[in-house]
């Protein structure tokens, strides 16, 4: 594969800023993976890797100003947004350090022999071990939180897995900078720098997923790119887990009672959510089922007013801008589709927010309007006006898997009267996170969080946000009748590490 230059590009002008690196050759990918593989032993001690994660957060925080400046030059996301995202990234690293210290993620279970059971139970001791080198594919829209030091990297390192990151071409300079900071943090704990590898280039990403020492992969990006890598992971001589986040429409259902009760607030909230970050969030609401009639009209007026006041913005790169402009034009050209606020080009390098409306009946059966059921990355949403509950059910029955699904209910419906529970039940099979009277943008880093969903939202049932994300990079192993002296410390009767565990059926903390 050719070693082409890797340039940092200013999305505000489309001009190249500086050459950052060159695309990695197959030999360089191999070297990065082998260096990561050799670094596994340095992560074996939980105390060391927890300290490493905290030091990484401290080092990133110390370099905040220059990191944010570098990120803004390549993404145009703005210092406020990027500062917040960096803080989230540091918090996430520290949260995983706490999880590593606690040790519950190891899922230690010990059963002593029981000859009275049917069949008899031998001595069995089970816990989870790290898979090995994890390939991480960075996202474009979160240059900190879903990139080199993002959730996939943090959770993999917490599990004891070194990583090799395939940088996103939209922020190569930032990727190099963050990798340098992580390696500096690793060195402070005598962990080899190879514990965090970084490669650039499309072909490098393909070589990475094929490498025999890569044990699992995490991806955030498009359906097309993610599916290609997912298929490659499955086609290997030894298939590996591929945890991909690919695409999501994030449907919203607004009941007629909710629209009648607070149309203005719902319209304004929707506008804020669909335009947040210039519509470049993976959980942007892309399809809204709203009632026809006066209540729905009031909601649309509020949405129109709010979206009309939204300034044009810069997308992450010109390819995305071109795709957005073409995508909304194709959708707007369909029969019975109107554009109360026309989305599209806002200038030579910007886009304008807007939304489309369509009768829900057009989406209830297969046809040319199926395009409206596909994600359009950028500040646009589709409002489907329904006449009755049957149309709502018909449209929901045709939707693919999503990261989120939202329902806006009236006060009475939220209290258990009306169809609130029924709509919730209809939305649950569609998404990994179901919201009531809120908006999906904003994914809290919390123990109970789930950021995933049925395909094509994700390729697995796991989450990429929250503490349980660590489970993706581990596998269970059980020892049977192993002498105590040969057992890992985690599985010994005297519990020298003080781990939470289930011991002969009793949960010990």
Image: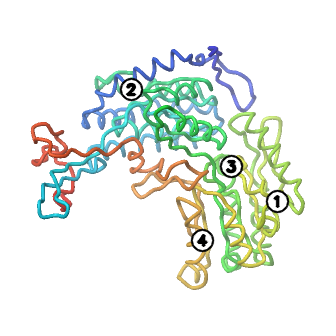
Residue at left offset 81%, top offset 63%: 357
Asked if residue 325 lies left or right of residue 102, the reply is right
Vertical side of 251 occupied by 371: above or below: above
User: Viewer-nearest of labels 3 and 4?
Assistant: 4
Residue at numbered disc 3 = 279
Colour convention of the picture: rainbow
Residue at numbered disc 4 = 426
Q: Earlier in the sequence, mark 3 or mark 4?
A: 3
Marks 2,4: beta carbons within 8 A: no
Vertical side of 317 occupied by 286: above or below: below
Marks 3,2: beta carbons within 8 A: no
**Residue 142 spot, x, y in % from top left:** 57, 40
Marks 3,4: beta carbons within 8 A: no
User: Viewer-nearest of labels 3 and 1?
Assistant: 1
Residue at numbered disc 2 = 195
Q: CA distance from mark 3 to mark 1?
A: 26 Å
Marks 1,2: beta carbons within 8 A: no
Q: Earlier in the sequence, mark 2 or mark 4?
A: 2
Q: CA distance from mark 2 to mark 4?
A: 44 Å
Number of the label disc, if any, that sits on residue 51: none
**Residue 425 spot, x, y in % from top left:** 56, 72
**Residue 13 spot, x, y in % from top left:** 75, 29
User: Viewer-nearest of labels 3 and 2?
Assistant: 2
Q: CA distance from mark 3 to mark 2?
A: 34 Å
Q: Earlier in the sequence, mark 3 or mark 2?
A: 2
Residue at left offset 45%, top offset 56%: 449
């Amino acid at each position: 594969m050719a070693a082409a230059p890797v340039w940092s590009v200013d999305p505000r002008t489309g001009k190249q800023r500086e050459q950052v690196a060159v695309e990695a050759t197959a030999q360089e990918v191999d070297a990065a993976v082998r260096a990561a593989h050799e670094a596994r032993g340095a992560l074996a001690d939980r105390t060391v890797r927890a300290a490493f994660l905290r030091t990484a957060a401290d080092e990133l925080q110390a370099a905040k100003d220059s990191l944010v400046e570098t990120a803004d030059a390549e993404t145009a996301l703005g210092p406020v947004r990027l500062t917040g995202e960096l803080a989230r990234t540091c918090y996430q690293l520290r949260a995983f350090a706490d999880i590593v210290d606690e040790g519950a993620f190891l899922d230690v279970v010990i059963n002593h022999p029981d000859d009275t059971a049917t069949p008899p139970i031998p001595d069995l001791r089970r816990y989870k071990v790290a898979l090995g080198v994890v390939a991480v594919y960075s996202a474009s829209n979160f240059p900190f939180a879903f990139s080199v030091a993002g959730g996939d990297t943090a959770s993999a390192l917490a599990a004891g897995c070194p990583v090799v990151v395939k940088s996103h071409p939209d922020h190569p300079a930032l990727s190099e900078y963050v990798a340098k900071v992580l390696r500096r943090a690793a060195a402070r704990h005598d962990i080899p720098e190879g514990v965090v590898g970084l490669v650039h280039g499309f072909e490098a990403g393909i070589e990475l997923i094929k490498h025999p020492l890569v044990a699992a992969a995490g991806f955030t990006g498009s359906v097309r790119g993610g599916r290609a890598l997912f298929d490659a992971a499955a086609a290997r001589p030894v298939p590996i887990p591929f945890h991909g986040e690919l695409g999501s429409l994030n449907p919203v259902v607004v009941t007629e009672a909710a629209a009648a009760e607070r149309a203005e607030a719902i319209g304004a909230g929707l506008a804020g959510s669909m335009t947040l970050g210039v519509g470049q969030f993976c959980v942007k609401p892309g399809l809204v089922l709203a009632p026809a009639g006066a209540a729905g009209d009031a909601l649309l007026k509020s949405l129109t007013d709010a979206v009309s006041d939204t300034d044009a913005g810069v997308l992450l790169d010109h390819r995305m801008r071109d795709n957005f402009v073409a995508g909304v034009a194709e959708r707007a050209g369909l029969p019975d589709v109107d554009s109360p606020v026309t989305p599209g080009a806002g200038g030579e390098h910007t886009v304008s927010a807007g939304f489309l409306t369509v009768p829900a009946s057009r989406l209830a059966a297969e046809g040319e309007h199926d395009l409206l059921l596909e994600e359009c990355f950028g500040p646009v949403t589709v409002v489907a006006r329904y006449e009755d509950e049957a149309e709502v059910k018909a449209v929901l029955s045709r939707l693919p898997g999503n990261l989120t699904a939202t329902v806006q209910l009236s006060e009475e419906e939220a209290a258990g009267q009306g169809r609130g529970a029924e709509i919730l039940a209809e939305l649950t099979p569609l998404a990994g996170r179901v919201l009531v009277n809120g908006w999906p943008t904003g994914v809290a880093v919390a123990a109970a969080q789930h950021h995933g969903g049925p395909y094509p939202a994700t390729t697995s049932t796991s989450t990429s946000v929250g503490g349980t994300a660590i489970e993706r990079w581990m596998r269970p192993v059980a020892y049977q009748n192993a002498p105590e002296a040969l057992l890992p410390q985690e599985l010994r009767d005297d519990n020298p590490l003080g781990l939470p565990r289930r011991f002969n059926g009793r949960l010990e903390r």
